[in-house]
Image (cartoon, rainbow, N blue to C red):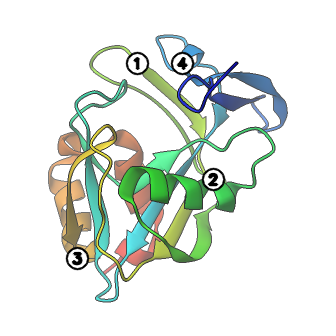
Amino acid sequence: MQTADTLVEHVILLDQDGREIGTAPKESVHGADTSFHLAFSCYVFNDLGEVLMTRRALGKRAWPGVWTNSFCGHPLPAEPLTAAVTRRARFELGLDISAISVALPLFRYRATDSFGTVENELCPVYVATTSAEPEPNPREVMEYRWADPTTLRGAVRDAPWAFSPWLVLQVKELDRFRA
């Protein structure tokens, strides 16, 4: 019998045109030869217009300890993307979010971290709002900061090596980060 602790999380595999072709255990697709799969990123804004930045926990398989967007994740098979975004906001940050909208529906990237772990994702980018303060899950997030979007854009431009590669690419495309 499987319990919540022993369930194997599956991701949705895609062909190069973004069509679903199957599923695979999440752990099997994040390595040196990562299959193209569906994920998402989300940027959470507070009532002051600041964006929530998080630093990935040191135990994360890809890009441990790196500053990134508010949170990322993978939808489960048959799970609507907005439901997955809501689920991961609660899991990673203890946050209830609202006004969820897709900002970059076709964003995709491929990047390799210093340990050789490859990300290869179709990764729609969402924005959302909250009026709450995060309560990070320490297995996911080691610290967080609220940042002015224009200041963040400048930091990403000046020191891209300090951030996740997907954040660097996304900030260049997201209207909310334009001065």
- The amino acid pointed to by label 2 is Ala
- What's the CA distance linking mark 3 and mark 2? 26 Å
**Which of the numbered marks, if any, corresponds to residue 84?**
2
Left or right: residue 160 compared with residue 9: left
- What's the CA distance linking mark 4 and mark 2? 18 Å
- The amino acid pointed to by label 1 is Thr
Residue at mark 4:
27
Pinpoint residue 23: horizontal percent, then vertical percent: 76, 25
Reading the chain from its start, which is encountered first: label 1 or label 2?
A: 2
Q: Which of marks 4 and 3 is in front?
A: 4
- Callout 2: helix, strand or loop? helix
- Callout 1: helix, strand or loop? loop
Reading the chain from its start, which is encountered first: label 4 or label 1?
A: 4
- What's the CA distance linking mark 4 and mark 1? 11 Å
Q: Residue at x 51, y 52 (%)?
A: 88
Pinpoint residue 177: horizontal percent, then vertical percent: 36, 73
- The amino acid pointed to by label 3 is Asp
Q: Are marks 3 and 1 in contact (CB under 8 Å)?
A: no
Q: In this view, does 155 lie above or below 2?
A: below
Q: Which residue is drawn at 58% across and 73% down?
A: 100
Reading the chain from its start, which is encountered first: label 3 or label 2?
A: 2
Mark 1 neighbour class, 10 Å CA radius: few under 14, some 14 to 19, many 20 or more: some
Residue at mark 1:
117
